[in-house]
Image: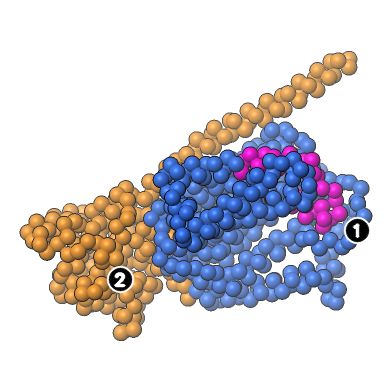
Chain colours: A orange, B blue
Amino acid sequence: MAKAILYDTTLCIGCRLCEQACAERWGLPYDDTIAKEEKLSERKLTAVVTRGERFTRRLCMHCEEPTCASVCPVGALQKTALGPVVYHEDRCIGCRYCMLACPFQVPAYEWSKALPRVKKCDLCYERQKAGQQTACAEICPTNATISGDRDQLIAEAKRRLAEDPERYYPRIYGIEEVGGTSVLILSAVPFEELGLRTNLPREALPVLTWRALSMVPDIVTVGTVMLGGIWWITHRREEVAAAEGKEKKS
Amino acid sequence: MNRPFASPLARLAWPRLTVWQWIFGAVMLGGLYAAYTRFLHGLGAATHLSDQFPWGLWIGFDVLCGVGLAAGGFTLAAIVHIFNIERYKPILRATILTAFLGYLLVIVALLFDLGRPYRIWHALIMWNPRSVMFEVAWCVMLYTTVLALEFAPAVFERFRWQAPLRWVRAISIPLVIAGVILSTLHQSSLGSLYLIVPHKLYPLWYTPLLPLFFFLSAMCVGFAMVVFESWHSSRAFGRQLELPLLASMARVLAVLLSVYLLLRFVDLRHRGVLALVAEPRLETWLFWLEILLMLIPAVLLFRRSVRLSPGALYASAVMVIFGFVAHRLNVSVTGMEAGSGASYLPKWTEVMVTLAIIALGFAIFRFVAKNFPVFPEESPRPLVAPAAGD
């Protein structure tokens, strides 16, 4: 079963324990200064963002058809059957196309290192493989973040929307966005008020480049035949002219 | 060209440097310092790139423009060898040389930009055929090889290596065809790279036709570069300008430019964003700069008098080159800023690396053109004044 996270912003109290647990899980430093940086970076793979009285979390959305994995020239990013999108740092050449292409602007880079890596949440792939919850879900005191099977979490989200329609904006973020994500978000207000991107297409983005790329074999075959043909015709004309010239002389 | 293999060091005797050599030296020193910063202290120290804006001048100019400016290579090779229009042959070798150097320098720029440059070869064995970048990587590698082989005869002739010369001449037609196909693929694919960011790239530039526009404008700038190089070579090496040849090429360029511009506006209208060309925003100004730099030479080059005047022809070519650069930078920088929520201006070290790479290109071209049979033999015209044109 594909794993996912359900994050209910109406339950989040902004305690930032998820940030701290995440930093511990990655062996990254965490203190008050870092806690105040409300954005993703090489040392913050999840960030709680304050929006007036509300809170929201930023982290890798683990798309069903990840843009980052499709654009990576060396396959350093991969969608696992378990759900997480994982990063193989030993493959990465550092072209940063994943950062440019990510519709959620998630991947961060170790800009200050001589041998940098891409940094992003991996949905605690190792923990999940061992049957554990993600570190952020495990520590969350209000159950704003829970982890589990994507299908069951979607069912749970729908149940919450149906049971308490007053409390929620009637949509689940992550079901349709760019073909669906493994992070699902519930909110009391329209998603753009939380700073989530709402101008994203329903279809997965890799389709856009695939349309162009799938023309490559045709260009190669048709192009070769055409150019070869033109070459043959133009040079044949010359040969014929030369032969005729010889005949006239003789 | 008639003189023996001259050591470039002999010309660089300390006290007698020309202004251009001083500039060259200063640029190279700056470039060295920038390289030191980049490789010892990381991309963060040498660039203004950020998580929000991961691609800057090195990709936008050095790579996107570098590859485009080298497009004269495949266009002219196709004209001479495939379409058998032999009269262009005298300028073919110089064009192939420029293209080859262009690609080598693009690779140098990539080594600066990649976070892990020593893994540049990974795409050879770690495949992801769904990635545009993967396709570009392969095409660039293969095409650079093709260009090396296309230029090889000049080297073999210089050292009188008959056997390899025969061998490389035998495969010249398949090479040219492969070169044209590979160029078509990756010139357009550089545009396809940006198909994946519909939510980030400003609508004046984001279009499903990006690959077509990148290909067409690359062909345009290919012709413009041939004019540009011929003009500078004629000044630097005291050669006659191949004016009738360049003029007829400039007419094709005028037609190509018109087709390109027409399609750009048809596309804007078709996507319903034509009104944006009057929006009071920075993007609009830079859009018009780009368009005018293509439109003015397009109009000018339809006039015979312009095409036959070396100065006007050269000025038109320069405008096309700047228009092309403006388009690439608009796609990669201007058009990406608002959508990324970031503003980007290159750091001086980024500019320094770019300048050093350009200077290196000029210097190597000059060296090779002096020491290898790049231009056809002709009776050398006496130099009126020391050439400082390049």
At horizontal 15% and vertical 70% (from top left) the residue drawn is A11
User: Dot 1: few (<14), some (14–19), or many (≥20) neighbours within 10 Å?
Assistant: few
Instruction: Using the rendered image of the protein, determine whether residue B372 is visible from the camera's viewpoint.
Output: no
**As displayed, is residue A225 above or below residue A13?**
above
| Residue at screen point 34% across, 80% down | A34
- Identify which residue, B243 or B309, lies in the foreground: B309
* Residue located beneath label 2 in the image: A46
Residue closer to the observer: A213 or B153: A213
Q: Which mark is residue A64?
A: none
* Quarter of the picture holding the C terminus of chain B: bottom right
Residue B245 is a magenta residue: yes
Residue B246, placed above or below residue A60:
above
Verify whether residue B209 appears in magenta: no
Residue B88 % position (x, y): 76, 40
Q: Quadrant of residue A21?
A: bottom left
Q: Which residue is mark 1?
A: B384
Q: Return the x and y of residue B226 as percentages of the image width and height.
A: 71, 48
